[in-house]
Structure formats: structure tokens, C-alpha cells
Amino acid sequence: MADQSTPEATSENALSGEAVSQKPSSVSQKSSSGGVFSRRRLLGTAGATGLALGAAGGAAGYAAAPSTDKAAPLTSLGADTVMFHGKHQPGITTALQARGHLVAFDLAAGAGRKEAAALLRRWSTTAQRLMAGEAATQDDTDVARDAGPSSLTVTFGFGNSFFARTGLEKQRPVALDPLPDFSSDHLDKTRSNGDLWVQIGANDALVAFHALRTLQKDAGSAARVRWQMNGFNRSPGATAQPMTARNLMGQIDGTRNPKPSEADFDQRIFVPAAGDPAWMANGSYAVVRRIRMLLDDWEKLSVKAQEDVIGRKKSTGAPLTGGTETTAMNLDKTDADGNLVVPLNAHARITRPDRNGGAAMLRRPFSFHDGFDTDGVPDAGLLFVCWQADPLRGFVPVQRKLDRGDALSTFIRHETSGLFAVPGGAAEGEYVGQRLLEG
């Protein structure tokens, strides 16, 4: 939970190589019988206005009793499309979506490189179609019928164990070595790691579920689900203006995320084109952690005490030393009694890149709430996902620093962990991971 903001709906998607279209690129203009428009026909009439995160959108896409010969256009929320093909995979610098699913798979017994290649080929074809607002090629469940693509993204990665399972040990990146143990970890190994990892995000819950279910069916006999986690964020248009997301503690969750407009963004977040191994060119490494928030304990604190834990104002995200959310924090400022205004163990102080040798990562999390324990304690928190060119220069040094004395650590618990190599985007005619599996 580093002091770095999550991606917002700006032109940064184009800067990062993830093209965002206001309308689906592949739509059918044919209507179904009886005058009821198909999903693809509806997409063709969509009146999109660009990415909708933080923008005002229509309250509904259809009238209460639409005529059979005229359908109202989709709002921009449903019509927004993220391109599957590109320099980088989608879902990394894409603006935060309202719904998310994280799922890990293990290859089935006896499945190897050949089966993995066929699976990634199927998954890539499915992801491309669904992200364009089209139905799955076979046995579509119709869960997302009548909905637009809704900024759907599907991202694929490989875990450490994948390479031994497929006989590709020599191609396993050094950066994929297991993360070190941290004293604050309480990890459930059955819900950690995995051979394959899939991240799904969309601004509509049914569109996201449809993608999840379709990809699970596509796995067939080649792979089985190891674990699945479901998350959410604030819906686009829920605030009057774009703003940094809040987490379940009520805090504005970070302000210092690297931005694609910064000169060193690619260097920090993506593996260079000439990197090692070659198949990871333009890819990134995702650290995934399920972080339980001890909300009952947190909510007993006064607002002032919560702000001292974080080092920022709860209402605005501004540093305790004054200004607005984006004002630089004055770490040396003291109060009338000579005490540091931002405590030494404040989360925002500890996670600053300039306090960690320049370590930075692009945070893109989802919140989660999975009910309550038997004693009534909420099972809720953050599905932490961060991206970096090398986890040993991104996540690891920051987490080590937090492990040694972060005030927030009293109120959170790291329960699962995963590290995945996410290759660069697939070119037209390619599937994700093809350069690894067929190289």
C-alpha cells in the first residue's frame, strides 16, 4: 500500500501504447430478427465520449420501455474499448475499472509446453473478441449480451513454476525469483503464486464475469483454477471530477504513482526492448498481494490518529505539512513542540521513492470484501497489484522498509502473494507469450 496513486482516466493510455477507442473496432451492423438489436448492432450505435472514469455519464442506456425498432445508444461507460494488440498488454496503464477478477491457474498433470501454447492461443483469441464487445467463438453464455465492451481488459502472466512445467527453465527470468520472506507476512500458500495468472478488469460487473467464466471454460483440460479473487473500485462517474481512488479505510490511496508522461516511466515500469530475456521485451512484472485490512481496529482511531499513521489528510490526501494532494511533503517540518509533523513511521514517509533508492512501482489495485469471519470480523481489504521493470528494484526494497516499522502495519495483514512475468503485448496475428512458447 505504497504512497503512489492509481491510474486515472487521462491521455496516459495513449502515451503508454495502450490505445483506447471510443467505439469498438469490430462490430456487426446486422440486427437480429424481430427488430431487437444484437449486442454488436448496439455497439455500432454507441455514442461514446472517451474514457469515463470520473466523467459524468448517463444514468441508463435504455428507456424503461424501448420500442422494438429503435434502441437508445449505449452510454460512454459501456462503449469504451481498450485495444488488445499493442506494445504492452492492456490492464497495466489502463484507467482503473469498477470491477476486477484476479485468477491463477496451474497446468494440469501431463500438460506441458504444447498444451500451454494452445491455451494461450485460445485465451488471446477470446480476450481480443471480448474486449471488442463481441461474443465468444464457441458456446457463449450470453451473460454480457446487450452490453458494450465497458473498458474490458484481460492481462496474462507466467509464474515461477510455469517454466519447469513446460521445460523452459532456461527462459525463466532472474527477476522472477521468489520474493523474500517478510516478517509481517501471514501467507496462505494455497492462494498464492500459480503457473499462470489472469487479470480481468471492466466497468460493468457482468462484462467482467462473462470474461472470467469464458476464460475458465477455455482452459478446458489444460489447466485448473488454483485461486480466484474478486475486487472493485469506485464506478466511473461517481465523483464530480476525476480523483485518486479511496480504499476501504477511507483514505485517498496514494498520490505519487509514476506517470507515463514522465521521462523515466518506461524505464521503471517496463522491461526494455533489448532486455533479458528477449521474450520479455516491453513486458512488466506484477506483484499481487491480498492485504487484509483490520477495519474494526482502524475505525476505532480518531481521524487525527489515522492521519498520523498515513502522513496525509484523510479528507483531501494533502500532506500533513500543508497544501493540496500533489504538494510536496516537507519531511523536516516540525510543530510548535518540535515534533515532526509527519511522524517517522508514517506510511507516506516510508514509501517515498527518494527514501528507497528511487524504487518505484505502478500501483493498480482493487478493493475486496468477502463477507465476515465466524467472529464477525470483516474479511475486507486491498487486492494489491503493482507493476515494475524489476521487482528487486521496485516492490522488494519498499516492502522491506515497511516491514521494519510502518505505522500502518498494525492495521493490515498480507495474506497471499504472487509474482508473475507479464510479457509485452501481442502484435496482430500473435498470441500473448508466443515469443516464449514458440521461440
Image (spheres, helix red, strand yellow):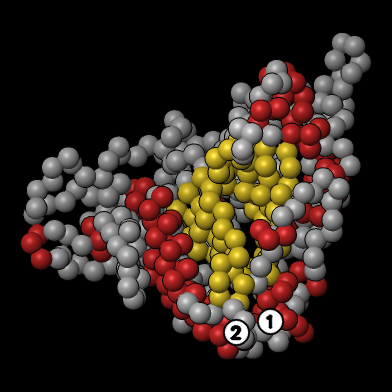
The crowd level at tag 1 (other Cα within 10 Å; few <14, some 14-19, many 20+) is: some
In-front residue for pair 405/31:
405
- Quarter of the picture containing the C terminus is bottom right
Position of 51 relative to 285 (above/below) = above
Q: Quadrant of residue 172?
A: bottom right
x, y percent for residue 301:
71, 21
Mark 2 residue element: loop
The disc label shown at residue 236, or none: none
The residue sitting at 84% across, 56% down in the picture is 181
- Quarter of the picture containing the N terminus is top right
The residue sitting at 62% across, 82% down in the picture is 109
x, y percent for residue 56:
37, 37
The residue sitting at 43% across, 34% down in the picture is 238
- The reply to whether the C-beta atoms of the residues labelled 1 and 2 are less than 8 Å apart is yes
Residue underneath mark 1: 165
Residue underneath mark 2: 111
Q: Earlier in the sequence, mark 1 or mark 2?
A: 2
Residue 379 vs residue 427: left or right?
Answer: right
Looking at the rendered structure, the kind of residue marked 1 is Arg
- Whether residue 266 appears in this view of the structure is no
Q: Quadrant of residue 352?
A: top right
